[in-house]
Image: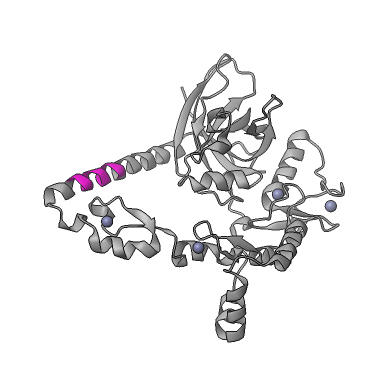
Amino acid sequence: MADLGGEELPQIEESSEQPSTSREEDVEIAEPVKKRAKKEYGDGKRPEEDRLERRLNGILCCTVCLDLPKSAVYQCTNGHLMCAGCFTHLLADARLKDEQASCPGCRTDISRGNCSRNLAVEKAVSELPANCQYCSCQYPRSKLEKHETEECQDRLTNCKYRRIGCQWRGPFHEHKEHEQDCCHPKKSGADITEALDVIDLKHKEELELFNHIFNLLSFEKIGFADIQLRPYRTDEFITRLYYESPRFTVLNQTWVVKARINNNDREPNLTVHRQISYQIILKSKVNTSIDMNFLVMKGPYDDVKLEAAVKRFQFSSDSLETDYYDFPLVTAAECNKLLAARNINLRIFMFQVQK
Ligand SMILES: [Zn+2]
Ligand SMILES: [Zn+2]
Ligand SMILES: [Zn+2]
Ligand SMILES: [Zn+2]
């Protein structure tokens, strides 16, 4: 569907729903349960349960990408599970090849009509523990985001005087102490004006970007596709990880997206500075040049945080590959999140400049 649609408008599907979590109250009311929950999550070592969790991970994971599904889970008529991202891509791949899509587990036909959601699996996954990225304690997946953004004592926090120039950023439990000693509130108006100028400049750039995107949205030729980048290894002596999408069609042309880590640095595992960059490749034969703007965004089934960035490239018969552009990741931690998930789901918009 979306993958094939040249001019289709984005459709927001059920996938954005998170499994509902009404369990919070239950835990709050029943005191013994609360105590038990506290003991279960937070103190790290539980070899017995760890093994159970690992077994459940193996049972509840997607049969295609083997990751735990982050949103909707679909199943074939024989009960094989597929995450929403993989399910859509199986259907889209089959459509591109003009074949009937089939379940990778049992080869029965799959379609939107004969596959159903599996809410029990979705809810079970949301209860499985995951580690907090700051304090490394374990929490149920459904509560992790709240913990990381509102509760974790180690979460990264800015100084409240940031708007007047303080660059301090540190763990939450240290911010009170810092703010007491922070020198910025005592600075002169002149010093503060400098800091405000920097903020103004940033706002101006953001405004220009949004105006640019609004402009692009009124182009005549707009298309988008939801693509899935899958990991591969080069067959060199020292293998390297790279990502590639299946071919997809937007605006009547066939495309492929590739991505690489740290610009193909030999040993990206030795550095903490990780960056993923991507390249867009035109696979169709063209006689005239195509002037194209791109906007890469997170796909509907992914939770990676990307900033908006528009790139422009002129394709022609002897210039079919763009440069490598860095993914506009919000924080460096997002890069590891991308690497940890097996596939990268992206939505890519294309806006063709008319001559
Ligand atoms: Zn999957
Ligand atoms: Zn099956
Ligand atoms: Zn934490
Ligand atoms: Zn400060």
How many marks can you see? 0
Q: Would residue 78 appear left or right of 265 to someone viewing this image?
A: right
Q: Quadrant of residue 71?
A: bottom right
**Is 90 contained in the magenta span?**
no
**Colouring chosen for the image of the structure:** one colour
113 or 57, nearer to the observer: 57
User: In the rendered image, is residue 30 in sight?
Assistant: no
**Is 200 contained in the magenta span?**
yes
Q: Would residue 16 appear left or right of 89 to someone viewing this image?
A: left
> Looking at the image, is 192 positioned above or below residue 36?
above
Residue at figure coordinates x 81%, y 49% from the top left: 110
> Looking at the image, is 324 positioned above or below residue 56?
above
Q: Position of residue 264 (x, y in %)?
A: 57, 28
221 or 238, nearer to the observer: 238
Residue at figure coordinates x 60%, y 32% from the top left: 257
Q: Which residues are magenta?
A: 194-202
316 or 60, nearer to the observer: 60
Quadrant in which ligand 4 is drawn = bottom left
Q: Position of residue 166 (x, y in %)?
A: 26, 52
User: In the rendered image, is residue 174 in sight?
Assistant: yes
Q: Position of residue 184 (x, y in %)?
A: 20, 55
In what quadrant of the picture does the N terminus appear? top right
Q: Quadrant of residue 154?
A: bottom left
